[in-house]
Amino acid sequence: MTAAVAETIDAFHRGLFYVVQPKGRGHRSGMDAMLLSALVDDDRPIRVADLGAGAGAAGLAVASRLPAAEVVLFERSQEMAGYARRSVLLPENDRMAARVTVVEADVTLKARLRKDAGLVDESFHHVIMNPPFNDAGDRRTPDALKAEAHAMTEGLFESWVRTAGAIMIPGGQLSLIARPESIAEIIDACGRRFGGIEVTAIHPRDGENAVRVLVTAVKGSRARLSLRAPLVMHEEGTHKFSSLVDDLNNGRAAYARR
Amino acid sequence: MTAAVAETIDAFHRGLFYVVQPKGRGHRSGMDAMLLSALVDDDRPIRVADLGAGAGAAGLAVASRLPAAEVVLFERSQEMAGYARRSVLLPENDRMAARVTVVEADVTLKARLRKDAGLVDESFHHVIMNPPFNDAGDRRTPDALKAEAHAMTEGLFESWVRTAGAIMIPGGQLSLIARPESIAEIIDACGRRFGGIEVTAIHPRDGENAVRVLVTAVKGSRARLSLRAPLVMHEEGTHKFSSLVDDLNNGRAAYARR
């Protein structure tokens, strides 16, 4: 047997763009990346940083929906950055390839090293992130590439949000998707850098616990946190997505701040 | 004009018990206290501490709904503790008067002073609290009694939750109601003392931001936080409470942990 690297080319936004992803290993993007990208609601010519971009699904989704957006995909793993570059270069993604750049960089770098890695101070209007997570309770994943994507380090949000605050213009918007149990760590990381935090819980169905939270915040804002009406993914008694969730997932709508 | 202290005697749980409260000054209890009391879902002979009990509405609501519960109302303000004592002694509250005690004590005391004030280590099964809050943004309240009830001090949750953790048996339950913007401070205060945190947002109506959060946690638990399905107070297009909220508000149901 020859050692073949299995991969797939997956359609998002009902075929409006595609992403090359490793198959059976590494983090595979899906709905989380699409919901994250929906948080960027800005038609102006903006610069958007996707921190920990993986194969590029969330950042490409922003570039696909917002024709004036330039997107930089920052990814630490050489291998995943390679997938991101190949994703950008797919012929199917031609209309946005000129607006999307891939930078291999560790988003937890500080000061001069961060700047040298391309994470330049006050150079983005939006920063999006879907930080890796893992549980002490989960079985150790045997897959090193996936383990890297899912490794939840102590202080992870602190270091990622610090970088987001640094590279964003005043008034810029941070957007992220995470698990509900991370909510205090996220708010603490926002600290005095960000205000106007808006949290939206995502529940699979009415009456069920949330499985994700969407969080946005504005650099330098003093407004207080709000806990918005939740999103319920599935309509009562069906496997279909609710129409709003389906629109967000397929790039037909943005999830605007209040 | 003589200086008369205006007060009212208010019915709760549709007349099942009453509370004497100052009128036009001080903190007046209402729905928050009733929702808080609904978090205690325990038919055993339990001891319940109400920290910062004010005139006693939440603690009396627990005693009213749970006939095996003994309740101690801890209140720092001499004047409010006086209202609490008079509430307990109302003839209408006769059936629970023997199970409710009022203790004038500052719940932020530590160590020996705390114990001497009656806040004895590992002596309660449940601790409930509706900690005071105020905004820098709100107009200063001209009423000293109300100001005391609403004063949000830096580290308030930390000191209140520390006391709750100390006076509760292992496996005991903390229950509180607070504003959404306090969520990170509450979770941080729970720290390693409490786990299995369950957060429920309360929204006035579908689509509106939450105005309160209900939080429960278990002393010594290692379970992770869950964000439960929200409670929506008002049914679509009416001023009526939803039937669950009405039941919680009127002592006809408890809001059980999952």
Image (cartoon, coloured by chain):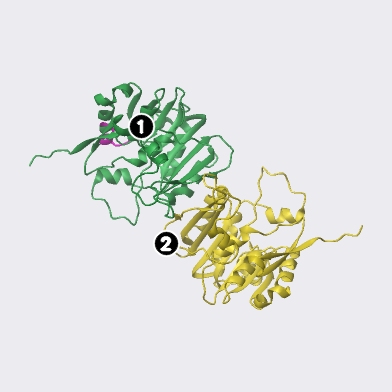
Chain colours: A yellow, B green
The one of B228 and A26 positioned closer to us in this rendering: B228
* Quadrant location, the N terminus of chain A: bottom right
* Up/down of B98 relative to A128, above or below: above
* Up/down of B163 relative to A217, above or below: above
Q: Secondary structure at mark 1?
A: helix
Q: Are marks 2 and 1 in contact (CB under 8 Å)?
A: no
Q: Residue B61: which disc?
A: 1
Residue A221 lies left or right of residue B104; in this view the side is right
Residue bounds of the magenta highlight? B74-82
Q: Residue at x 41, y 25 (%)?
A: B69
Residue B212 lies left or right of residue A172; in this view the side is left
Residue B51 visible to the viewer: yes
> Is residue B79 in the magenta section?
yes
Q: Nearer the viewer, mark 2 or mark 1?
A: 1
Q: Secondary structure at mark 2?
A: loop
Characterize the local packing of mark 2: few (<14), some (14-19) or many (20 or more) Cα atoms within 10 angstroms: few
Q: Residue A185: which disc?
A: none
Measure how far apart labels 2 and 1 are at the Cα level.
37 Å
Residue B56 visible to the viewer: no
* Up/down of B67 relative to A255, above or below: above
* Image coordinates for residue A132, horizontal then vertical, percent: 65, 55
* Image coordinates for residue A185, horizontal then vertical, percent: 55, 51
Residue picked out by circle 2: A222
- Amino acid at dot 1: Ala
> Is residue B17 in the magenta section?
no
Labels 2, 1: one chain = no
Numbered marks: total: 2
* Image coordinates for residue B159, horizontal then vertical, percent: 43, 41
Q: Residue at x 65, y 70 (%)?
A: A16
Q: Residue at x 40, y 43 (%)?
A: B242
The one of A248 and B84 positioned closer to us in this rendering: A248
